[in-house]
């Protein structure tokens, strides 16, 4: 059977595609696993109060179509009957568009200096956790390989 890519349409890029507030995103989004009450408070049932409010505001303001494209591409990546290359290209395209929007906002003064600094610290904090997790998993994999 021939490969038929999922119907993912490219999103028109605009420097104005980053809404000021996350209120433009529907509270019924399936991407959020917390209830509306917790979402409005900015808390997580697992982690408590948000430690990354700037990052959350920025990410939650993304257009719903963009998030659906990512979801579809990730599902295609997991599906054995779909082309992994097409899925990765779609994911890369959406993420690069997002990065371009962020760069535009930083260059054109959409964010204050304090917002930029706070966002940078939040991302660094998250990256440290991810880096430590990767390092631990790598060590686990090495020890498993040695034991076999």
Image (tube, rainbow, N blue to C red):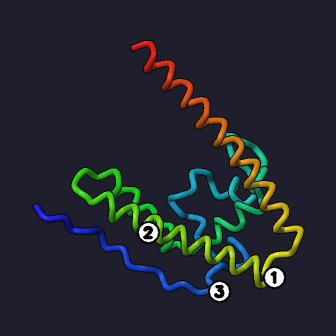
Residue 89 falls left or right of residue 101: left
Image depth: mark 3 or mark 1 in front: 1
Picture layout, residue 82 above or below residue 131: below
Sequence-wise, which precedes: disc 3 or disc 1?
Answer: 3
Residue pictured at 45% horizontal, 16% vertical: 146
Q: Which residue occupies the foreground of this view, 49 or 102?
A: 102
Residue pictured at 85% horizontal, 63% vertical: 117
- Marks 2 and 3 in Cβ contact (< 8 Å): no
Query: Label 2: few (<14), some or many (≥20) within 10 Å?
Result: many
Which quadrant of the figure contains the C terminus?
A: top left
Residue 16: numbered disc: 3
Find residue 118 and report its horizontal and vertical position in percent.
Answer: 84, 61
Query: Label 3: few (<14), some or many (≥20) within 10 Å?
Result: few
Picture layout, residue 125 above or below residue 83: above
How far apart are the alpha carbons under marks 1 and 2? 28 Å
Picture layout, residue 139 above or below residue 37: above
Residue annotated with mark 2: 69
Helix, strand or loop at mark 3: loop
Image depth: mark 1 or mark 2 in front: 1
Residue 9, by quadrant, is bottom left
Farthest residue, direction right: 114
Sequence-wise, which precedes: disc 2 or disc 3?
Answer: 3
Residue pictured at 64% horizontal, 85% vertical: 15
| Numbered-mark total | 3
Find residue 4 and report its horizontal and vertical position in percent.
Answer: 21, 68
Residue pictured at 53% horizontal, 58% vertical: 31
Residue 8, by quadrant, is bottom left
Find residue 122 and report its horizontal and vertical position in percent.
Answer: 77, 54
Helix, strand or loop at mark 1: loop
Residue annotated with mark 1: 109
């Amino acid at each position: 059977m021939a490969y038929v890519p999922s119907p993912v349409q490219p999103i028109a890029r605009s420097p104005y595609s980053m809404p000021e507030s996350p209120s433009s995103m529907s509270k019924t989004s399936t991407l959020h696993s917390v209830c509306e009450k917790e979402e409005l408070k900015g808390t997580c049932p697992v982690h408590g109060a948000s430690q990354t409010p700037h990052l959350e505001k920025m990410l939650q303001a993304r257009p719903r179509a963009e998030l659906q494209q990512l979801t579809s591409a990730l599902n295609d990546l997991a599906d054995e009957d779909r082309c992994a290359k097409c899925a990765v290209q779609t994911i890369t395209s959406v993420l690069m568009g997002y990065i371009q929007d962020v760069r535009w906002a930083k260059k054109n003064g959409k964010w204050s200096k304090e917002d930029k600094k706070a966002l940078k610290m939040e991302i660094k904090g998250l990256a440290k956790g991810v880096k430590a997790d990767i390092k631990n998993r790598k060590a686990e994999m090495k020890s498993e390989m040695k034991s076999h």
